[in-house]
Amino acid sequence: MRIILAALLFSLAAQAKETVRIAFIGPLTGGNSAVGLGGRNSADLAVKLHNAGPGSKYQYELVVLDDECKPDAGVQMATKAGSDRSIVAGVTHYCSVVAMATVDTFHRFGLPTIVWGAVLPDITYGHDFKEIHRVNGTMINQNETNAKFMAAQGYKKFAVIHDTTDYGKGHDKYFTKFITEAGGQIVGDFGVTADQQDFTAELTQIKALSPQALYFGGLTPIGVRIRSQMDKLGLNAQFDGTSGIVNDDFIKALGPLAESVLAFREGAPAEKLPGGRKFLEEYGKQGYSNPPEAYGPFAFVAADLLMQTIEKTGPDRRKIIAGLAQVKDFDSIVGKITFDDHGQNTVPVITKYVAQDGKWVLWEESEYARGSRKLRGK
Amino acid sequence: MSIIAQYVMNGAMLGMMYALVAVGFTLFFGVLDVIQFAHGDVLAAGAFAALAVWLGLTRLGVASPALLLALVVVAATVATALLGAAVARFLVLPLKGAPQLNVLLVTLMMGTVLRESIRLFYPGGSQPQLFPALLPTSSVALGEFNLRIDNVILLAAGTVLIAGTSLLVTRTRLGLAIRAVAQDEETARTMGVDFRRIVLLTFALGSALAAFAGVMDGLYYNEIFFGMGLLLGVIGFAAAIIGGLGNLYGAILGGFFFAALQTIGAVALPFASAYKDVFAFGVVIALMALRPKGLIGERTSERV
């Protein structure tokens, strides 16, 4: 009798797996929501694949929270996730300003998080908190590649427009540093607010300085406005962007004006990586209404890495943090992942993009690299 | 020299939009002594109505830009005029006699309702929406100055509208009634002026002007978004105040003055152009302290 009861209990326990909740936080509304929704879908896909797969100890549930790309909303959501004890870890933030603002909150609640898109270096390097990790690279690597590339293309005179958040200021700082080292010259540097509408005054000044290229450190919404107002003022400089504009919205909003815009991003495109094709296939099968966008694969990897760690350590915040500290050469669809002592993935790859015929095309595969089309301002 | 022409042109475009919004504020204040804080969001609603009509018409196969533009402008102004009149009829008039603070609060909330409704109910409303370029986009380069035909048309149309409004207020029977109500409601009533009708018409007129500013904004930037009315509303209000609230010419002057301040803040001052709004609003505060009645004080001129 006792044996039967024990067997019964055992089988019940095996059937009803414990549910483990992890949070996803990103911009789901507002000007950057396309990237946010792509990230959410990708994290959701990771959870679904994990739950459907054999041999997992736990059943996972994704708690989706909207940070609106605003620091105050971000801190609110971080507090919500942190104070909810049933949530054991988080896949957090695309916007650097928000990721920067929530670092302290996650530390206070001891919630292990993996940043899936924000590129400001200080998010991982500005403190010694063990909770914060990041699978994507920082803007330091991105701007170094950008500056070297532009110098090699023969650009010497640059104007800079950046938003005055930590994100834009960071881009400005690193690009200025690397381009000056590469022999370039910044003829004008303009800080603008992140929701500014009219750039005609700044652009008229820039036009008078006649730079060959305009470097833009900021996100899609004002990037779109600046590019379109450049055209209205007849400013024919090459538009040189950052990872903040690598998404379909930027091209969709600009139409033919997007042609020849440059941008740089950490990691390599999913379809070029082992397992990346499978990711895109599975993503397509789910019938999401938005594409994964540039940072979807990172959100997928962050969620996947968290779940694989939880399988080993159990759903306990402190143990997960200890487990993440051990991550080394983890195979993922964005390449190998190794966290340094700041929880930063040391990714070496930066990909160069150029907008061609309404798509972001790898520079190496573009007609611009082959010479059949020419960049502007040369 | 040509670069200064470019700055003046940029500033004039902004100034025209601000002036159109400010005129609305000043008209409302004139007839009812109220501040209609939903004005900026009525403008955004007008711009979105224009976009929706454009989408509908292109689906139906209307291809002529001139016809499209005409229909879009008419639809936006009519929709917004009705919306403005509705705000007056259902929110402002019933509160007549209540403390002014109540009207301010109610319209402020109405603005939030409008803004959030666009965000929630317009398809994809939380994203900036692409606004079609319906005007000819050719341009003439004069040195540093890039003169765009569409900007010239917009400026001319704005000037005609403002001049028309001014003529309407000063030269017509309707204008006479509006001015009569503005000066003394009781006397105007005893003289047989239909007070309610005049108030509704004034709100419709002011809101239609805002709709034009909204469409102008869309055509100029090729982009509109649900929160566009917020800053435009605040700037329009500030412009009406510095011009002297209740004074039509003051509002126009205030609009262009504010645009000039923003341009100077971005161009001629030694700090980052991100501070241009800080500078412009700072000057407004200083002006209010020096000239509490505005640039053209009420005492020296007749209130609209």
Image (cartoon, helix red, strand yellow):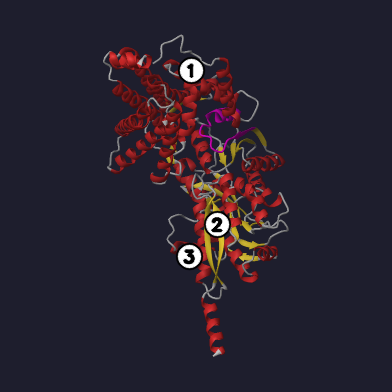
Q: Nearer the viewer, residue A117 or A13?
A: A13
Residue bounds of the magenta highlight: A188-210
Give how far across and how far down residue B290 sits, in percent: 57, 15
Give how far across and how far down residue A31 sits, in percent: 50, 44
Q: Residue at label 2?
A: A24
Q: Residue at label 3?
A: A282
Q: What element carries label 1?
A: helix
User: Which amino acid, by three-letter code, is at mark 3?
Assistant: Glu
Identify the image quadrant of residue B41.
top left
Q: Which of A330 and B202 is in front in this view?
A: B202
Chain name for mark 3: A
Q: Residue at label 1?
A: B243
User: Which amino acid, by three-letter code, is at mark 2?
Assistant: Phe
Quarter of the figure that contains the N terminus of chain A? bottom right
The residue positioned 41% from the left and 17% from the top of the image is B248
Q: Which of marks 3 and 2 is nearer the N terminus?
A: 2
